[in-house]
Image (spheres, rainbow, N blue to C red):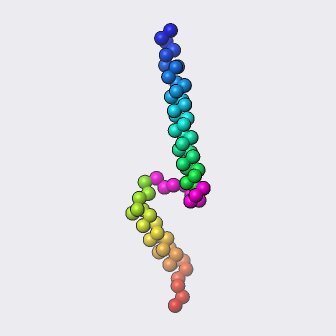
Amino acid sequence: MGRFQWMEAMLPLGIIAGMLCIAGNVQYTIHKAAHGRPKHIGNDMWDVAMERRDKKIVDEKLYPASN
């Protein structure tokens, strides 16, 4: 009788795990649809500033302004 108690816990744990996976995938899909690319994990204000700086430098090298 007590040998299969662990099986009773598997259904709720499976439901919880499934809901967590669904919630994460919904967030990923919404962010990708809104921004056109996946979210960078751990991307703080410093990383954003460096990304803008790098893009500016690359653009200046590729397309120099003609004065």
Q: Does the magenta segment cover residue 12? A: no
The residue at the far bottom in this view is 67
Identity of the residue drawn at 42% across and 67% down: 49
Q: Is residue 22 left or right of residue 57?
A: right
The image position of residue 42, as x and y in percent, is 43, 54
Compared to residue 39, the image places residue 67 above or below, namely below
The image position of residue 50, as x and y in percent, is 42, 67
Identity of the residue drawn at 54% across and 37% down: 19
The part of the chain drawn in magenta is 33-41
Judging depth in this view, the residue of 33 and 53 nearest the camera is 33
Q: Does the magenta segment cover residue 35? A: yes
Q: Of helix, strand and loop, which mostly describes the magenta segment?
A: loop
Identity of the residue drawn at 46% across and 69% down: 52
Q: How many marks?
A: 0
Q: Quadrant of residue 62?
A: bottom right
Q: Is residue 7 left or right of residue 50?
A: right
Identity of the residue drawn at 49% across and 16% down: 5
Compared to residue 63, the image places residue 20 above or below, namely above
Judging depth in this view, the residue of 41 and 12 nearest the camera is 12
Compared to residue 60, the image places residue 2 above or below, namely above
The residue at the far left in this view is 46
Q: Quadrant of residue 23?
A: top right
Judging depth in this view, the residue of 62 and 7 nearest the camera is 7
The image position of residue 65, as x and y in percent, is 52, 85
The image position of residue 22, as x and y in percent, is 56, 40
The residue at the far top in this view is 1
